[in-house]
Amino acid sequence: AQSVTQLDSQVPVFEEAPVELRCNYSSSVSVYLFWYVQYPNQGLQLLLKYLSGSTLVKGINGFEAEFNKSQTSFHLRKPSVHISDTAEYFCAVKAQGGSEKLVFGKGTKLTVNP
Amino acid sequence: DGGITQSPKYLFRKEGQNVTLSCEQNLNHDAMYWYRQDPGQGLRLIYYSQIVNDFQKGDIAEGYSVSREKKESFPLTVTSAQKNPTAFYLCASSIARGPNEKLFFGSGTQLSVL
């Protein structure tokens, strides 16, 4: 079975500062990795995903994430955040092959202050 | 516009009552999912369906039931057996299972107990 740990439940930052949201996963098999974003009172949207190839993945809204197999991590980064980035961010993992389900982390609430 | 529509946005349940949450999609997606979201707990899978007239239990199916009589519709019933139903419920769909699976989410239904 797979599991996801998002190390920070809340991350407050100032506008235009860089941010990193941390995600570690556990799995006995190879995995696909995802980041989803949830704005207040809405559903989730896919931000980016890692399937294979380059370990640096670029997503929407200027976000990127780096897959590190040795550290089993998939941290999300943005060099300069905006007020509009205030949302909850979910890391998710899915085992490769078969019809495995997506497993979500508990989420990190990012608050961008002026 | 294509998308997933969840209704109602807010729902109140009385003790011992069954309530049904609606989820409709016009994306022509085969797979549909129901997730429960509790603050600080992330998303937990209740039920999923990969094809009409077939569905499988997720991680927390007890106290819930579903049906999939039409491709577009996947209603969730919260039965009286679910003793702690207060949560935010999210419906999602995807075109196919596999590495490129991307979940599209509805805007959610907040269920509260009176």
Image (cartoon, rainbow, N blue to C red):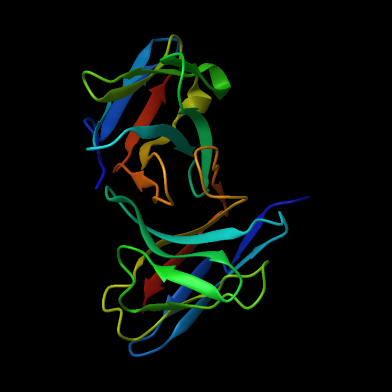
Residue A9 image-quadrant placement = top left
Q: Residue furthest bottom?
A: B16
- Is residue A38 shown left or right of residue B5? left
Q: Does B59 sit left or right of B102 as displayed?
A: left
Compared with A57, B80 (above or below) is below
Q: Nearer the viewer, residue A53 or A84?
A: A53
A51 left or right, relative to A2: right
Q: Position of residue A72 (x, y in %)?
A: 24, 25
Q: Residue at x 24, y 48 (%)?
A: A1
Seen in the image, is A111 located left or right of residue A27? right
Tell me where residue A26 appears, x and y as whole percent.
22, 36
Front residue (pair B101, A22): B101
Compared with residue B39, is residue A34 higher up or lower down, i.e. above or below?
above
Q: Is A95 rendered above or below residue B27?
A: above
Residue at 71% across, 54% down: B27
Q: In which quadrant is the C terminus of chain B drawn?
A: bottom left
Percent x, y of residue B100: 55, 37
**Residue A20: x %, y % from top left:** 33, 18
Residues A85 and B102: in front is B102
